[in-house]
Amino acid sequence: MSRNVTRRVAVTALASGAVFLIRKAHGQVVWQVNASRCVNSRLGEVGVEACNLCTSSCVVALSAVRAVNEYSKCGRCNICPAYFNIASAVDEKGLPSEKLCPRDAIARKPIGKQDPEDPANNFYEYVIDEEKCDGCGRCVMKCKEPLGLGSITLQVRYNRCLNCNRCAISTDCPKDALEQVPLPEALKPGEARPTV
Amino acid sequence: MSEVRYRQAGSIAGKGGAPHQFSHSITGLALDRNGLVYASGDSEIKVFDAAGKLEKRWTTMRPVLAVAVSRQGLVYAGEEGQIELFDPATRNARVWRDEKMLGRVTAIGFAGDSVLAGDAAARAIRRLDHTGRCLGTIGTDNNVGGLLIPNGVVSFAVDQEGVIHAANPGKHRVERYSLEGRLLGHFGRFNFHDPAGFTGCCNPTNVAVSDRIYVTEKAGPRLKVYSRGGEFEGVIAADCFDPNCRNISVQAGPLGRVWAADAVKLQIFVFEREAA
């Protein structure tokens, strides 16, 4: 009885492994960043520098990984810690004088009509320019809770990813945050990509 | 300016399964006229004496997000879509249910005959009569139609004159409103380095008023005190809070006593003002 069960479990595991390999051979398996493992977005780690292995390890020029802002989670804050370097000096408008992104890949614009008497009283839309972004993760680290709302995460862009058999980022990532998933289960760009 | 000094006088509750502890959340604090401390969290109201000993506790219908005690001793529990009212004397309970006007009640206060409910779903403060009927909405007369609360909590306190002090974290300030909803003034500004300012995307998150104004912030978490005029007087505590803590409920009592609830450690810290 128990031998039958063991055999059934083993056969099931072998079969699912075979299906995975067949899918992989046909390009139906892709790499994906697991946000709950990525040190830049996982909760509970504060006060550490952003990890930029997705930029430095990827074999694709400028990396296949991008920071993606999920608008349904974004607080649309006036002082966004992912947009501003909030530790920089405050300018005459009361805003931090420096931006956080070293590639100036995040643009911001007020939503709706801005009150000239009170510009702080507004929502702002933050759009990431994927032609500039290299997935360095700085904005992701600053956006995560409790400082932000965790709306920005790192994601593999499949139009850029070469889908290497052994992803160089996954080899280097100390948190095993890069994982292979069947294509139907992978995040689709439209699910998280801003539609401007 | 001489800094006002406080010392930590003790702590209440904590994380765990014991009756005096909370297991998942601690969301609100209140005081009654006898000096008892009411804490809301999980789906319970717990009552502690001044020494921190659990006096009584009871469950709520839904996870409780706020607690307040009226002058008559009636206990109000803010929840999603409703306010539960408990009368400890008669052990009677009733409910004001209004999914639209009481979307997510994260703060409750009293001014005159009115009950005020902070509705985080509407980003506003509802003014209710003694039957729970909505008389008006406070904090929506601006171009974004409400308070800017990326932290998901409306927090306010009412002073003895009936002025409402509401945290508007997205604007990095505390705003004062009349009961009719008129903006009377505000204090605070963004500043990362100066402790007089409010840091991050959105602070202060919570506010309490007595003879002074007390606020809590997130990332990094701290409890600060301002004069009633809005002048910074000092940081009361920072290191005791979990770095991931946000929306630290705060309550101010007489004689410079302050309670602040760490939402990660599920612990209430008690502070006392030291004599000058």
Image: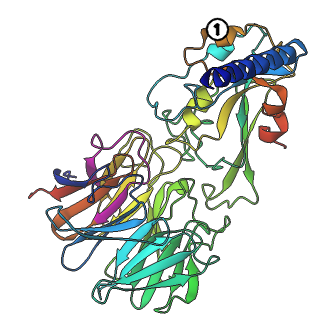
With B69 as the anchor, is A20 left or right in this view?
right
Quadrant in the picture for the C terminus of chain B: bottom left
Q: How many marks?
A: 1
> Which is more toward the observer, B125 or B192?
B125
Residue B5 screen position, x and y as percent: 17, 52
Q: Which range of residues does the magenta coloring cover?
A: B232-251
Residue at 35%, 62% (x, y): give it: B230
Give the quadrant of residue B91.
Answer: bottom left
> Which is more toward the observer, B79 or B271?
B79
Q: Determine which residue is flagged by label 1.
A: A171
Please rate how many residues cluster around mark 1, counting C-alpha atoms within 10 Å: few if below 14, some from 14 to 19, many from 20. few
With B63 as the anchor, is B194 left or right in this view?
left
Residue A188 screen position, x and y as percent: 82, 34
Asked whether residue A81 is in view, the answer is: yes
Instruction: Examine the structure image and report whether residue B10 is included in the region drawn in magenta.
Output: no
**Residue placed farthest to the front in the image?**
A1
Residue B269 screen position, x and y as percent: 25, 53
Q: Secondary structure at mark 1?
A: helix
User: What is the image's colouring?
Assistant: rainbow
**Residue placed farthest to the left in the image?**
B275
- Callout 1, which amino acid? Thr
Give the quadrant of residue B239.
Answer: top left
Instruction: Please determine whether, in this image, residue B76 is positioned above or below residue A41.
Output: below
Residue at 42%, 40% (x, y): give it: B244
Residue at 76%, 58% (x, y): give it: A112
Instruction: Examine the structure image and report whether residue B237 is included in the region drawn in magenta.
Output: yes
Residue at 60%, 42% (x, y): give it: A80
Asked whether residue A136 is in view, the answer is: no
With A18 as the anchor, is A170 left or right in this view?
left
Chain containing mark 1: A
**Residue placed farthest to the right in the image?**
A26
